[in-house]
Image (cartoon, rainbow, N blue to C red):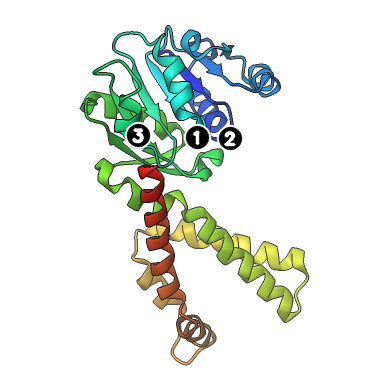
Amino acid sequence: MTIAILGAGKIGEALLAGLLASGTTPTDVVICERVPERATEIVERYGVERSDAPADAVADAEVIVLAVKPGDIASVTGLAADGLRSGAMVLSVAAGIPAASIEALLPAGTPVVRVMPNTPMLVRQAMSAIAAGTTAGVDHLDRAEALMATVGRVVRVPEAQIDLVTAVSGSGPAYLYLVVESMIDAGVLLGLPRPLATELAVQTAVGASTMLRETGEHPALLREAVTSPGGTTAAALRELEDGGLRAAFYDALEACRDRARDLARG
């Protein structure tokens, strides 16, 4: 299919790289990026087509990916609407922008699928959730899932759950980075050289995540397997629980959900 990617920032580039790695021909992709230097960089790196006008970029596209910042959605979508071909599907990765808001800027009946990815799509390990707008059907979700599967795993949810997805996986990498950062700093405090503490913490996070995925075990069972009665891990976990770690995560995810809802309301 022919694809137009409006916005060539990190998310737009990550999706582009995934598409090309999965077999999409560069000449079937056109990018539109308002920063000329960035557009030139992307074209030289990937060999895709380029258009500086959104309406021209989408003219022949079957799928239009909105990968611009949320604050630019209205202006870019409005400009692109003039060139949209009949039957084209719009895929939005803009956080906090409801499908209905995008649909209102497009010709009546244009199918819109909303996507909440996360930044590990940069290494093709994303967790993306897709939700259909009012006129998108199963075939549009199938197409969206195929596109997002090039950069990681995909689940389908009702749009009403997108803000909840944002709280768990959309913003989730930042929580894990903070945990790893804290482990590194604690290791340095204990007396380890920072490069060694970093290697230990990062690989521990990678290994633990891999075990969660590959074993399919509940995290509580994997945690218990590491925790000997009266042992070192039990002592550490008691401190984390006493420090309110679990409650802090509850509060953090609720705050993230509420902020996502605020953004959606404008």
Indicate the amino acid at tag 1. Gly
Q: Secondary structure at mark 1?
A: helix
Vertical placement of residue 248 versus 116, above or below = below
Q: How busy is the neighbourhood of tag 2: few (under 14 within 10 Å), some, or many (20 plus)?
A: few
Name the amino acid type tagged 3: Arg
- Spot occupied by residue 156 in the image (x, y as percentages of width and height): 28, 40
Mark 2 element type: helix
Q: Residue at x 62, y 60 (%)?
A: 202
Q: Which residue is under mark 2?
A: 10
For marks 3 and 2, give the CA distance. 18 Å
Instruction: Choose mark 2 or mark 1, whichever is in front.
Output: 1
**Residue 116 percent location from the top left of the image:** 40, 41
Q: Which quadrant does the C terminus fall into? A: top left
From the top left corner, tell me how far across and down residue 133 is, in percent.
26, 31
Outermost residue toward the bottom in this view: 230
Residue receiving disc 1:
71
Disc 2 to disc 1, how far (Cα)?
Answer: 16 Å
Is 14 rendered above or below residue 116?
A: above
